[in-house]
Image (cartoon, rainbow, N blue to C red):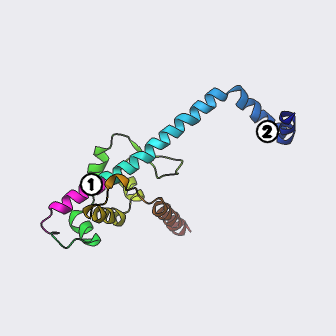
Amino acid sequence: MIGPLIEAMLGKVGRAILYFYRDNTIWINTIVLIYGLFMFATWNNLVRIYRFLIAEMAKATYTSEELNRKKSNKKIRKIIGVPWEKAVKASPFPFIARMGALIPRRKTVENLKLLLDEKELADGVLQALQGAKIQRMAPSTRKMIQGEMERRKHKEDKNA
């Protein structure tokens, strides 16, 4: 009884889509599931790279003679730096994406720099050196989205 009512509300195009979906449910759901697992792996890969960078920078900061007791965000970024190339080589999965993104990116130094903020990484290093657990740290999705919006706005201003 409800089926014909829904079909009537969908209209001609909606019914065609509904019948196509009913005929190919297994294939469509399989594709969606594979895509979902792939995107989950890309999101997870970015978090792993973020944690790897914090751990590497924390090791370098801890053993640095120049930063002995005077550790600050700016000094860590200036003296230690971010080992982007090492992170790219250490991660086995070739794609990254921010949490909630629908399109993955290749895992390159440029793309990592677009998604991860050096200041946020240095803050994570300071937290790790104070005893915070690296396993619980994750990059800020809000900052990534803000960065993307700023880059789009800058690009639009440049083209205009």
Residue 81 percent coordinates (x, y): 25, 62
Q: Secondary structure at mark 2?
A: helix
Q: Earlier in the sequence, mark 2 or mark 1?
A: 2
Q: Quadrant of residue 14?
A: top right
Q: Quadrant of residue 54?
A: bottom left
The residue drawn where x is 32% and y is 56% is: 133
> Of the numbered discs in the image, which one, if any, rests on residue 14?
2
Q: Secondary structure at mark 1?
A: helix
Left or right of residue 73, residue 146 in this image: right
> Of the numbered discs in the image, which one, if any, rests on residue 55?
1
Under mark 2, the amino acid is: Gly
- Does 61 lie within the magenta span? yes
Image: 117 above or below 93? below
Instruction: Say if residue 106 shows up in the picture.
Output: no
Instruction: Say if residue 119 shows up in the picture.
Output: yes
What stretch of residues is rendered in magenta?
53-67
C-alpha separation, residue under disc 2 versus residue under disc 1: 52 Å
